[in-house]
Image: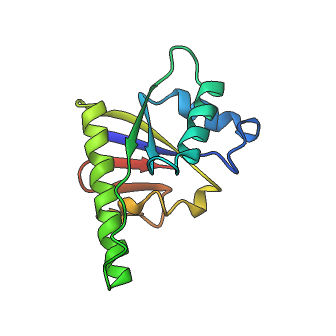
Amino acid sequence: MFTLSLIGIGSGNPKHLTLQAIDALNACDVILIPSKGAGKDDLAGLRHEICAQVLRSDGPEIHEFTLPKRDAANPDYHAGVHDWHDAIAQVWLAEMQRTLPQGGRVGFLVWGIHRCMTAPCALRSGCKRPSHSPSMSCRGSPRFRY
């Protein structure tokens, strides 16, 4: 089983991280950093910088992976976005399985506040959030906490 922690990093300034966010990062087994590829790697770079500043020497491993691109040629924009989100979810799950074959705690640094973290849940295919809990459960065995 995987536990995916969506860890809020606010505006991305490492000096603005909460102690709770730093503890959550260090509690992970691995931190996955998505990259959109050459020329769009500034957000991945900032995530790496944050990790370099706050992770303990015995902290989690960091793995970067490439996100799939949306098919801009799809004439049905909403269907294209839905398909893209499904592809993102599959890449996330594959990376979690590759980096932690036995399962474990996976961290992902997200911008903004926790109530606005639906984009990282582009893993929305199969995800549902119980109304009484801040955790999400998803098919494929990840469990989300934010």
Residue 91, x across and y down, in percent? 29, 50
> What residue is shown at x 46% (from left), y 56% (from top)?
120
* Residue 56 in which image quadrant: top right
The residue located at (46%, 30%) in the rendering is 28
Tell me which corner region of the image, top left, top right, bottom left or bottom right, holds residue 17: top right
Q: How is the image coloured?
A: rainbow
Q: Position of residue 114 (x, y in %)?
A: 59, 56
Above or below residue 79? Residue 18 is above
The foreground one among 7 and 135 is 7
Residue with the most extreme right position: 15
Residue lying farthest to the front in this orientation: 39
Give the residue drawn at x 37%, y 81%: 78
Residue 7 seen in the figure = no
Quadrant of image for the N terminus: top left
Is residue 40 placed above or below 52 in the rendered structure? below
Q: Nearer the viewer, residue 65 or 72?
A: 72
- In the image, is residue 9 above or below residue 85? above
* Residue at left offset 25%, top offset 44%: 94
Residue 16 in sight: yes
Image mark count: 0
Location of residue 41 in the rendering, given as x and y in whole percent from the top left corner: 52, 46
- Outermost residue toward the bottom? 75
Tell me where residue 47 appears, x and y as whole percent: 57, 39
